[in-house]
């Protein structure tokens, strides 16, 4: 049954009650990971797939028990692919890679057209290896290794946070920086464009624009967005996003937050997430050095490219954020961890929490110390297992794309 909306979609904070979320249950794409390709495909190990699925099912069930509607990316995609237009679009974009050659491209285009929507979803997510095709043989197939992919698998689909992000009632289809992830946004764009549930949804950004990844985007408060700038989101990406959100009146302030261009801190949400309207949990080893540049609208101009931005000098992140949010203090929950424990738990996504409501956050159970400190600070920590899920280097926030969050109540 095609999923239908239960109300308007959108989110304007990190902590408003989570009503609807999009997840991706790990599937056959994880079975493609080998010691030869896991680095390129951005996994730090080879996950035990059935255990990863069990962990993910428990995560989804935890969300449902708390009243969250869980949508699965692959179910939305399969429903989208019922339309011939969407199917053709999906096939053309999946075959646009320059490594294919026309002989194989023609063969695959025909072969994929004959698949059912469910089978096509499997190919689009798990990819196809050279030794799995029955036809289209020729120069390309003979020169590639039998185990080379003609269509790459997408193991990082698990991290639905990164390939789209809702800002108020619009969805930003992002532009992913790493080659292994680029194709993910072909799928999110297709879903938001063609799935009946999202008919009429207005979009911003897009995969063809400068790099912005959803893990870097934090909706600190209605109208205030922090954007990490580092390994994934570029300075030009944050400028583009700022122009769009100002032009569409989705925000009044964007904070550009430089983060180290390293795998451990690939997104802003690997070092800092919100757990209350005025509280963040932050990796202690960056807390003293995290800074932000405040971007506001100086002149609306006549269109997005013509508007003038005002850009401040950099300030400590918490100071700049509190000012923009018009609150006295944005509190950093002091985990008081020694640098080594802090580093270990940050690597295992201890700071990557998913808020279900103010003061209620989902976290990986393995990060004992961070979780205990959060509880000491009055946060209800909903612990989930993630021993296998975590091998892709992402936590509960990375694995979730909020589609509806209730607006914050003004008390
Ligand atoms: N927001 C996030 O931090 N997402 C985690 C993404 C992990 C994935 N293996 C990646 O390297 O892109």
Image (spheres, rainbow, N blue to C red):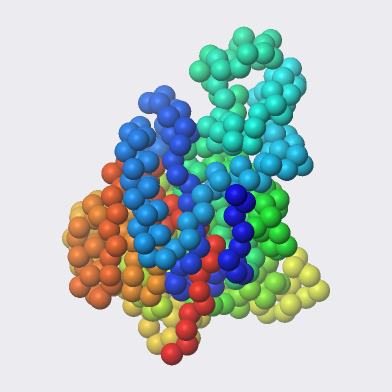
Front residue (pair 299, 224): 224
Q: Where is residue 322 in the image (x, y as percent from the top left)?
A: 44, 81
From where the camera sits, is residue 286 visible?
Answer: no
| Number of marks present in the image shown | 0
Q: Where is residue 169 in the image (x, y as percent from the top left)?
A: 63, 69
| Residue at the image position 50 percent from the left and 70 percent from the top | 405
Pick the quarter of the image with the C terminus: bottom left
Q: Is residue 174 above or below residue 359?
A: above
| Residue at the image position 50 percent from the left and 74 percent from the top | 406
From where the camera sits, is residue 144 visible?
Answer: yes
Front residue (pair 59, 166): 59
- Give residue 129's quadrant in the image: top right
Q: Where is residue 17 in the image (x, y as percent from the top left)?
A: 44, 72
| Residue at the image position 59 percent from the left and 55 percent from the top | 3
Q: In this view, does 279 lie to the left or right of 171?
A: left
Front residue (pair 245, 57): 57
Q: In this view, does 345 lie above or below 94?
A: below
Can you name the residue that lies furthest to the front here?
1
Q: Is residue 144 left or right of residue 292?
A: right
Can you name the residue that lies furthest to the right here?
302
Q: In this view, does 409 lie to the left or right of 193?
A: left
Q: In this view, does 259 lie above or below 44?
A: below
Q: Where is residue 335 in the image (x, y as percent from the top left)?
A: 23, 67
- Give residue 15's quadrant in the image: bottom left
Front residue (pair 91, 312): 91
| Residue at the image position 65 percent from the left and 58 percent from the top | 197
């Amino acid at each position: 049954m095609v999923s239908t909306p239960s109300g308007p979609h959108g989110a304007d904070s990190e902590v408003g009650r989570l009503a609807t979320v999009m997840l991706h249950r790990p599937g056959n794409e994880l079975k493609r990971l080998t010691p030869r390709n896991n680095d390129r495909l951005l996994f730090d190990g080879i996950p035990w797939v059935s255990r990863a699925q069990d962990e993910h099912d428990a995560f989804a069930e935890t969300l449902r028990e708390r009243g969250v509607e869980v949508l699965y990316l692959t179910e939305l995609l399969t429903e989208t692919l019922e339309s011939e237009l969407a199917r053709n679009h999906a096939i053309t974009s999946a075959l646009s890679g320059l490594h294919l050659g026309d002989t194989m491209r023609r063969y695959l285009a025909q072969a994929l057209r004959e698949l059912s929507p469910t089978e096509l979803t499997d190919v689009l997510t798990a990819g196809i290896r050279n030794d799995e095709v029955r036809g289209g043989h020729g120069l390309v197939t003979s020169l590639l290794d039998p185990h080379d992919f003609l269509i790459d698998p997408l193991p990082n689909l698990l991290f639905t946070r990164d390939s789209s992000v809702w800002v108020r009632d619009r969805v930003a289809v992002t532009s992913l920086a790493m080659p292994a992830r680029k194709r993910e946004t072909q799928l999110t764009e297709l879903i938001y464009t063609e799935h009946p549930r999202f008919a009429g949804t207005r979009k911003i950004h897009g995969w063809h624009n400068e790099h912005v990844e959803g893990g870097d985007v934090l909706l600190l408060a209605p109208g205030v967005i922090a954007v990490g700038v580092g390994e994934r989101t570029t300075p030009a990406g944050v400028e583009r996003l700022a122009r769009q959100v100002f032009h569409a009146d989705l925000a009044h302030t964007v904070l550009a937050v430089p983060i180290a261009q390293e795998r451990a801190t690939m997104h802003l949400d690997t070092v800092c997430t919100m757990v209350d309207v005025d509280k963040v949990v932050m990796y202690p080893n960056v807390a003293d050095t995290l800074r932000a540049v405040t971007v506001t609208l100086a002149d609306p101009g006549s269109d997005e490219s013509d508007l003038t931005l005002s850009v401040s000098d950099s300030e400590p992140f918490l100071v700049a954020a509190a000012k923009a949010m018009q609150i006295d203090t944005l509190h950093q929950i002091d985990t008081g961890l020694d640098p080594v424990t802090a580093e270990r738990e940050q690597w295992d996504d201890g700071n990557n929490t998913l808020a279900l409501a103010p003061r209620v956050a989902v976290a990986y159970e393995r990060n004992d110390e961070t979780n205990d400190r959060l509880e000491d600070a009055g946060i209800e920590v909903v612990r989930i297992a993630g021993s296998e899920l975590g091998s892709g280097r992402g936590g509960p926030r990375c694995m979730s794309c909020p589609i509806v969050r209730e607006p914050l109540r003004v008390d």
